[in-house]
Image (spheres, helix red, strand yellow):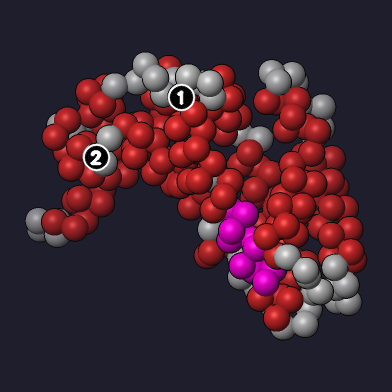
Amino acid sequence: MTQPLSTRSERKREQILEAAGQLFVQQGFITTSMDEVAQQAGVSKQTVYAHFGSKDELFTHCIERKCVVNELLFSGLTGSNPRNVLMDFIGRFVEMINSEEAVYVYRLCVSQAETHPDLSQRYFEAGPAKVIGTLAEYLKSLHEAGVLTLDDPQIAAEQLLLMCRGIGNMRLALGLPMDQDDAACHQRVTQSVDLFLRGYGYQG
């Protein structure tokens, strides 16, 4: 049976994103060409451009895809217990930012910041800004429900994410070995979430 056009198109789109993500990590954004992406994805160059108008746009969608795969956009904040919801969400966030791929892309953007500031801007808007916005919307809903008392959900979201990022992620970004095991990372997340909730009046 012939696949629907939309299904085939979506499959090719995923192939392109997967291939581009691998190439960006393996050889960097600047040196990766759309021809190489097409070859790696097993599609034509025209197909790549039909889905993504430029390499910059493709990079943006690769960052967004990483957040979607790790459930760090709106679908990832569900549940009736705020503490459990935040623990799950922050746990996925920490796991993602500590991954080899995420650390590499972050270093890449920092190293190219002076010569390609647009790359850093795209990275920030497609990744960190969207995750912060997602968390801020959830925290706002908790404030409106009287669960938390917040002056500014956006600032609160930034506080929680940066607090949970931890020194371990900084070490990885600097090329130093991670000095915490999974248990220690989980403990940091637990302590940070509990401190955050107490600070904003959670009574659960």
| Vertical arrangement, residue 87 with respect to residue 105, above or below | below
Q: Is residue 14 above or below residue 86?
A: above
Q: Is residue 6 magenta?
A: no
Q: Quadrant of residue 147?
A: bottom right
Q: Residue 186's x, y, as percent?
A: 80, 47
Q: Judging from the image, what secondary structure is the residue with disc 1 in? A: loop
Which residue occupies the extreme left position in the image? Answer: 2
Instruction: Residue 101: tell me if it is visible.
Output: no
- Region rendered in magenta: 131-140
Image-quadrant location for residue 118:
top left
Q: In the image, what residue type sits under mark 2?
A: Gly
Q: Amino acid at mark 1?
A: His
Element at badge 2?
Answer: loop
Query: For residue 85, which quarter of the picture?
Result: bottom right
Disc 2 crowd, CA 10 A, few/some/many (<14, 14-19, 20+): few
Q: Residues within 10 Å of mark 1 (few under 14, many from 20)?
A: few
Q: Is residue 174 left or right of residue 55?
A: right
Q: Quadrant of the C terminus?
A: bottom right
Residue underneath mark 2: 53
The relative height of residue 113 versus residue 148 in the rendered view (above or below) is: above
Return the mark for residue 36.
none
Instruction: From the viewer's perspective, tell me whether residue 85 is left or right of residue 33.
Output: right
Q: Residue at x 50, y 37 (%)?
A: 121
* Residue 36 falls left or right of residue 123: left
Q: Nearer the viewer, residue 109 or 76?
A: 109
Q: What residue is rendered at 74% in x and 41% in y?
A: 165
Residue 116 is tagged as 1
Disc nearer the start of the sequence (1/2)? 2
Residue 5: percent from left, percent from top: 13, 56
> Which x, y percent locates residue 70?
54, 50
**Distance (Cα) linking label 1 and label 2:** 19 Å
